[in-house]
Every structure is written in structure tokens, then in C-alpha cells.
Image (cartoon, rainbow, N blue to C red):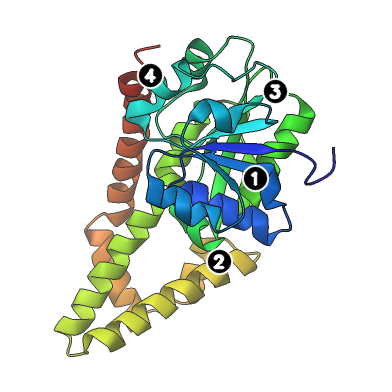
Amino acid sequence: MSNVDFTLAFIGGGNMATSLIRGLLNSGFSPRKISVSDPVAAQLETLSELGVQTFTTNDDAVAGRDAVVLAVKPQVAQKVVAELNTLQPHQLLISIVAGINTASLYTWANPEQAIVRCMPNTPALLGAGMSALFAGQRCQPDQRHIAETLLSATGKTLWVDHEQALDAVTAISGSGPAYFFLLMEAMIDTGIDLGLDRETATNLTLQTAFGAALMAQKSDESPGVLRHNVTSPGGTTAAALAVMMDAQLPDIIERALHAANTRAGELAEEFGGNI
């Protein structure tokens, strides 16, 4: 199977599905190989302008496709999957639904279903996503390739060997953008308190965040070493970091991520019917 020699159906045409579709099209994937179903007519109209096939029923979109991307709200996932009549076990079911584990998907679809569960994050909307993937036991190498090709279209990907690791992935990268947005928000507000106008404070904060992330990504050193390198003893950075350490910021972050990890597991029980 070549890089683009497969067909895809999307159940749900929301923001994440649309970003994946756009990413595929930008990488040379043929729109004729993509079908989408969604209950919202306006959403289908927008997607049809991209050249993909659109359907009002899930069964029509799914029929005969190599892979099916489940991109719906967790609250309706069980109903959507259980009511699919055209989904066959040999078709790859790719779930990007938060809080739904493979045990639930096997029960709702078929115990023999080929399944890949993915946890993307919202920067995928800009092609800068980070997605983790877990392959179910029935997933074949060519199907793993399909899933990786799909998620790679909107950023970086990695595979995890144990499904439970996706809870930690959710805590770090799935929910992670919001943590950085909170820090940016606080820095902007404080910049205004220090006498800067909002535009200046915003520009300074966002470019600093971008630059710091780029430095960490490009450097061979760990973020801890980079932090040490830019912290002069007795300087302004040291003064600010001392306040953060006194407030036990690393402990706060640890507790926050543990809370997100725990909640991810709870969601699997809540929306997965305690499977």
C-alpha cells in the first residue's frame, strides 16, 4: 500500500476532522478518496467545497472505505458506533474521541474490529499537533500506516505500547495547550499591570513562548539545563523563578497533570458504559 493508496470516511465533520482532511489534501491526498458524514448541513457544505464526498447518513459514508475516522462527541459515540450497519471488521476504525477506550469500541462495533485509538491536540488545527496512537490487537501493519499517515498530516505522531499511556498523553499534550494558554494569559495581564498596553504585552508574551518552545525543540539540552543557562545568579530571571519555586509551581503542575490523568480514566468509564 502506497502512502496515499487508501480511502477514508469521517464520521463527524467538526474542527478536528476538518483539520485532518485539510492536512491530507495539502499533502497530496485525493479528495475523491475521502467521504464525510455530519448532521449539520452547513458543515457538509463547507467540506464539499474541498472536493470531498459528503453524506447525511453515516452508513453511506462508511460503506466500502478502508478506514473510518470516528470524530464525534464522547457522549454520542456509543450510539453512533452501535448503529453502524456498513462497518465491517476488516475496516480500520480510527477513534479520535476522548474518553472512549478500545474495550468499549470492540463491544459496540465488533470484537474482531481493527482499531487504532488516537489522542491528538488542538494545535493540529494549525498543522502543529502532537498525536499519540495505540493499535488494537487486530490492527495490521498497513492499517497502522494509514493511521500514522492521517495524523502525521497535522503534526508529529508517536505510538504507545499500552493503552493506559493515552491517559498520561491526554494529561500532557491533549490538555497541555490550555496550561500554556493560562501562563500566557497571566503574563499578559501582569504586563499590563506593569504599565504595558495589551498589544505590547501580548506580542512580547506570545513571541517569547514561541521562541522558548523552539529553543527547547532544537536544543540537545533538556529544558532544565536551558533554564539554568538563562538564569544569572542574582538577576531578574532568578528573582522571578524564586517566587515560582516558593509557590511550589512544580508541585502544582504535578498535581494538575495527575488530576487530568485520573479524569481521563474516569471519562472512559463514564462514556464507555463501565466497560
Query: Type of residue at label 2?
Result: Ala
Query: Type of residue at label 3?
Result: Cys
Is disc 1 surrounded by few (<14), some (14 to 19) or many (20+) residues within 10 Å? many
Disc 3 marks which residue?
139
Find the distance from the CA under tag 1 to the CA under tag 2.
Answer: 26 Å
**Residue 136: x and y, percent?**
62, 21
Image quarter of residue 9? top right
Front tag of 1 and 2? 1
Tell how many labels: 4
Q: Is residue 29 above or below residue 76?
A: below
* Label 4 SS: loop
The front one of 211 and 141 is: 141
**What residue appears at the point 46 percent right and 69 percent down from the top-left corner?**
227
Quadrant location of the C terminus in the rendered image? top left
Disc 2 marks which residue?
216
**Residue 244: x and y, percent?**
27, 63
Sequence order check, earlier mark of 2 and 4: 2
Disc 4 marks which residue?
272
**What residue appears at the point 39 percent right and 30 percent down from the top-left corner?**
99
Disc 1 marks which residue?
150
Residue contact between numbered discs 1 and 4, judged by CB atoms under 8 Å: no
* Label 1 SS: helix
Residue contact between numbered discs 2 and 3, judged by CB atoms under 8 Å: no
